[in-house]
Amino acid sequence: MSTSDTIDLVHASLGEQELAAVAEVFASGWPAGQGPKGKALEAQLKERYGAGDAVAVSNCGAALHLAMLALGVKPGDEVIVADYTFPAPAHAVRYVGAVPVFADVRADTGTVDPQAVADLIGPRTVGVIAVDTVGMPADYAQLQAIADRHGIFVVEDAACAVGATYQGREAGALAEVACLSFHGRKGATSGEGGALITADAALGADARLRSSFGIGSIFDQAQVVGLPIPQFTEIGYNFKLSDIAAAILQVQIGRIGELLKRRSAVAEQYAQLLADEELLSVPRVPEDRTHAWQSYMVTLDERVDRSAVAKALRAQGIGCGHGTWATHLQPVFEGGRACPVSADLFARNLAIPMHAELSEEQVQRVVATLRAAVREHAGARSAA
Ligand SMILES: *Cc1c(COP(=O)(O)O)cnc(C)c1O
C-alpha cells in the first residue's frame, strides 16, 4: 500500500526469511496446528520467557479467554480490567460469564493505576487483567503486591509489548499468566496469532487442551504405532495456531530485537523533534521500564481539534488514528463506572506513524505536518 508519498500508520516487516520458513511447512505436508513448527515455536517462547509453559494460539483474544478458563473464573465473579486499551480483556471476562470492573489508568503512562485497582477489590473479585498499553508495561510490582494481599490473580495482557521490559524483566513474563498477540499490527506478527505464557505448567496444559477441542495433538497421535482412540474430556475450542503461522513467528521472534531497535530510534526522533511543541505532549517512559512502541501516541492539548488535525495529516498521505479505546465508553460495556483519565486519553490521544521501516526523512515530514496542523487547529483554551 505504501507509495513514495504516503506514510503508513503501521507496516508489518515481513520478508524473504518468513517466506522461506513458509516454504518449509509446505514441503513438510503438515500445515495445521500443533505440528513440528508449532511445537518448535512453543519451545522457543518457553525459553525466551523462562516460562513453565508457552501455548501457541490463534490470537490474543483466544489466549485471554483460555486464561480465564484455566484460572477458573466463573459466572458472577468480578475481574478488574484496565480501561484504556483495545477492549479484549473485558471481552474475555464476559466470555466466561464474569463481570469486568473497569479500573482507571495513570495519566502519564496510560497503564492501569494500582490505587484504582486496590479501591475496586470487593468480595467477588477474583483477579486483575493489566495491560501493557500500546507496549508500555504496567506497574507489576505494585499490582502483584495488591493481588497477593487479597489472594487474587494477575494476568498480563502483553499483546503489544514483545520486547518491552519492566525492572529488567521481559514483558510477557511479568505475571502468572501473560497473553501475547501476533496480529499484523503488533511488533512480531504472523498476520493473526497469539500465545499464552505461564509460569505454571498446569495452567499451560489446561489452556493447550482447551485450545484443541479438549483432545491432545492430532499430529502426536499420528506418530503412535497402533490405533489409540483419544477421548474428549472437555468442551474445548479450536484456538490452534497453524504451523504456517508458527513458522513465520519463529523468524519474527528472532527479529524482535532488530525491529524494536528501529522503532525505538523512531520514537527517540519524534520525542526530540516534538519536545518544544506546546500543543501536544509526547510519551514519557518511567526509568524502570522500556517501551515496545507498538504505537506512538501523542496527547494533544485540549485546545486542539483532533479530528481536524487527523484530516490534515491524512490529506497529506500520513496515516494516523485515535490510538486505543476507553473500554467503559463502548456501547457493549456501557453502564459501568466512570474512568475519567481513560476517557480523557481516549478523547485527546493521536497515534502517528510507527513501524520499523520509517525513514528519518519520513519522521521529519510527519513532525512538520503535525506541527503545522496542531497550530492551525488550536482554538481558545476551553473554559472547562
Ligand atoms: C491487539 C490487542 C489484543 C487482541 O489481540 P488479537 O491477537 O487481535 O486477538 C488484545 N489486547 C490488547 C491490549 C491489544 O492491543
Image: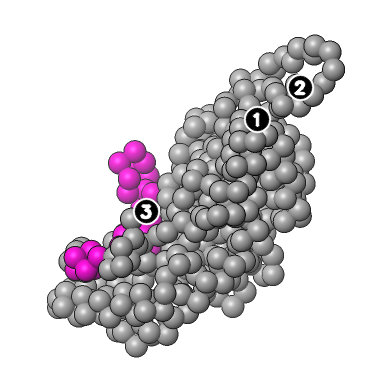
Whether residue 313 is in magenta: the answer is yes
Structural crowding at the residue carrying mark 2, measured as other residues with C-alpha within 10 Å and reported as few (<14), some (14–19) or many (≥20): some
The segment highlighted magenta reads 312-341
- Is residue 30 placed above or below 196 in the rendered structure? above
Q: Check disc 3 and report its element: helix, strand or loop.
A: loop
Residue 221's label in the rendered image is 2
| Residue 35: image location, x then y, percent | 69, 33
- Is residue 212 placed above or below 175 in the rendered structure? above
Residue 325's label in the rendered image is 3
Occupied quadrant, residue 23: top right
Residue 29's label in the rendered image is 1
Mark 3 residue's CB less than 8 Å from ligand 1: no
Occupied quadrant, residue 345: bottom left
Assign the C terminus to one quadrant of the image.
Answer: bottom left
Q: Amino acid at mark 2?
A: Gln
Assign the N terminus to one quadrant of the image.
Answer: bottom left
Q: Main secondary structure of the magenta part?
A: loop
Q: Residue at x 57, y 51 (%)?
A: 18
| Residue 284: image location, x then y, percent | 47, 76
Question: Who comes first in sequence, dot 1 or dot 2?
Answer: 1
- Is residue 374 placed above or below 161 in the rendered structure? below
Q: CA distance from mark 3 to mark 1?
A: 42 Å
Q: Amino acid at mark 3?
A: Trp
Number of the front mark, 3 or 2: 2
Number of the front mark, 1 or 2: 1
Q: Residue at x 50, y 77 (%)?
A: 265
Q: Check disc 1 and report its element: helix, strand or loop.
A: loop
Whether residue 112 sits left or right of residue 72 in the image: it is left
